[in-house]
Image (cartoon, grey):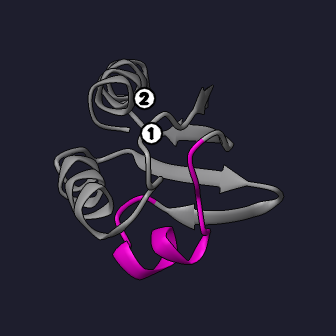
Amino acid sequence: MKTFTYTITDEVGIHARPAGLLVKEAKAYDSKITVTKDGKSAEAKKLMALMSLGVKKGDTITVSVEGGDEELVAGKMEEFFRNNL
């Protein structure tokens, strides 16, 4: 399993538009991608679960990637977060 932390810089956090983009990106990979904030976790392929985390600007999240392509996916997801959130 690969993990990284990221502090959200988007003004409104993980709201509908970026959450939708995140789900689309996550679905492109076989690995399981989990976003965790304050002990609550959501699978990155599930829009409503992601939005239920209530991630706001300045919050630090942990992203975990587990699967056969986890090395590649972790790098791609970290890049996605830097570019979109």
Task: Give the residue at x 52% y 40%.
Answer: 66
Task: Say whether marks 2 and 1 touch (CB < 8 Å).
Answer: yes
24 sits left or right of 7 in the view: left
**Residue 73, position in %: x, y?**
34, 29
Magenta segment includes 55: yes
**Residue 58, position in %: x, y?**
64, 39
Magenta segment includes 73: no
Q: Secondary structure at mark 1?
A: loop
- Specify the farthest residue to the front: 11
Q: Is residue 54 above or below residue 5?
A: below
Q: Image quadrant for the N terminus? A: top right
Task: Give the residue at x 42% y 19%.
Answer: 71
Q: Nearer the viewer, residue 52 or 56?
A: 56
Task: Give the residue at x 81% y 56%.
Answer: 38
Q: Which residues are magenta?
A: 44-57
Read off the residue under disc 2.
Answer: 70
Q: CA distance from mark 2 to mark 1?
A: 5 Å
The residue type indicated by label 1 comes to Gly
**Residue 61, position in %: x, y?**
65, 42
Q: State how many labels appear.
A: 2
Task: Give the residue at x 18% y 57%.
Answer: 24
Q: Nearer the viewer, residue 60 or 66?
A: 60
The residue type indicated by label 2 comes to Glu
Label 2 Cα neighbours within 10 Å, binned few <14 / some 14-19 / many ≥20:
many
Read off the residue under disc 1.
Answer: 67
51 sits left or right of 85 in the view: right
Q: Nearer the viewer, residue 45 or 38?
A: 38
**Residue 12, position in %: x, y?**
44, 55
45 sits left or right of 7 in the view: left
Q: Image quadrant for the C terminus? A: top left
Quadrant in the picture for residue 84: top left
